[in-house]
């Protein structure tokens, strides 16, 4: 199975990565007119992080499909720069970073944001037939909860009577929940949805417990590096149109992911 750290999962790491990207030296600004003249816009993505992105033409992940739809709206080609980890975007000459957390607390002036297009966060997954709770605060003593090591979710769970079980990868947590090795796990809704999409015979129960924890819920947008105002406006128009015509919701549905419009 894949072992890539996915965007938005380990929030502390994600924030550090974004800080590294925005503080590193950037190439000269690429205005929208230059992108139109070249006929190409680029995106940085992880080659092994489904359902987010993957270097697989048949299943490229929703980040790539949304980026491609944006490029089509701009009437240019999409070029993909495969990078691991995400912070390497500072060393690659790409224009877009998908699923960028749209928060002034984690963004610097070098990254401009599009309109937000999806709500992200860290939900709770439960095995079929296991009792669920509606929020993190309702987790009970004796409940074994899988958490990503050093994540904000682990800090939230540590304040409850539940017993934390540390993991390094969300794939492993999904499997552990399905097998009953843990009672629940703090996992991104996208990963839970994709697991259920790929394992219809043993679906996990998804509870949006992040709705009651502001630190574990955020919206995501297209992060634009070195963009001028016309490029931001063009991408905003593309994102708005793709939301309105159902394209973005349809792309998420292909991977079993609920679309939660910001």
Image: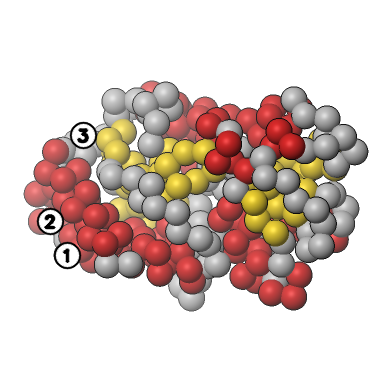
Q: Earlier in the sequence, mark 2 or mark 1?
A: 2
Q: Quadrant of residue 148?
A: top right
- Residue depicted at 83% across the width and 37% down the height: 140
On screen, residue 81 versus residue 243, left or right, reads: right
- Name the residue that disc number 3 marks: 28
- Name the residue that disc number 1 marks: 75
How packed mark 2 is, by other alpha carbons closer than 10 Å (few <14, some 14-19, many 20 or more), is some
Image coordinates of residue 10 in percent, x first then y, are 61, 38
> Is residue 13 in view?
no
Chosen colour scheme? secondary structure
Image coordinates of residue 172 in percent, x first then y, are 75, 53
Identify the disc placed on residue 174.
Answer: none
How packed mark 3 is, by other alpha carbons closer than 10 Å (few <14, some 14-19, many 20 or more), is few
- Residue depicted at 20% across the width and 63% down the height: 73
Q: Nearer the viewer, residue 149 or 215?
A: 215
- Name the residue that disc number 2 marks: 36
Figure check: 258 above or below 235 = below
Q: Quadrant of residue 213?
A: top right
> Is residue 254 in view?
yes
Q: CA distance from mark 2 to mark 3?
A: 17 Å
């Amino acid at each position: 199975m894949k072992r890539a750290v996915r965007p938005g999962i380990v929030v502390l790491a994600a924030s550090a990565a974004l800080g590294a990207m925005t503080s590193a030296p950037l190439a000269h600004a690429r205005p929208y007119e230059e992108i139109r003249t070249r006929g190409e816009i680029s995106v940085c993505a992880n080659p092994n992080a489904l359902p987010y992105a993957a270097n697989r033409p048949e299943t490229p992940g929703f980040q790539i499909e949304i980026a491609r739809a944006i490029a089509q709206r701009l009437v240019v080609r999409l070029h993909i720069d495969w990078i691991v980890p995400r912070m390497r975007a500072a060393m690659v000459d790409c224009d877009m970073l998908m699923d960028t957390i749209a928060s002034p607390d984690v963004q610097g002036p070098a990254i401009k944001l599009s309109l937000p297009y999806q709500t992200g966060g860290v939900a709770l997954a439960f095995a079929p037939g296991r009792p669920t709770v509606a929020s993190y605060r309702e987790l009970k003593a004796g409940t074994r909860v899988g958490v990503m090591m050093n994540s904000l979710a682990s800090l939230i769970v540590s304040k409850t009577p539940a017993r934390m079980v540390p993991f390094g990868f969300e794939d492993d947590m999904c499997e552990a929940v399905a097998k009953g090795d843990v009672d629940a796990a703090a996992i991104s809704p996208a990963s839970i949805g994709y697991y259920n999409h790929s394992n219809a015979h043993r679906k996990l129960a998804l509870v949006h417990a992040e709705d009651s924890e502001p630190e574990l819920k955020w919206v995501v947008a297209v992060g634009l590096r070195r963009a001028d105002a016309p490029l931001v406006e063009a991408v905003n128009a593309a994102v708005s149109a793709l939301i309105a015509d159902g394209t973005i919701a349809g792309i998420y549905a292909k991977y079993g992911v609920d679309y939660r419009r910001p």
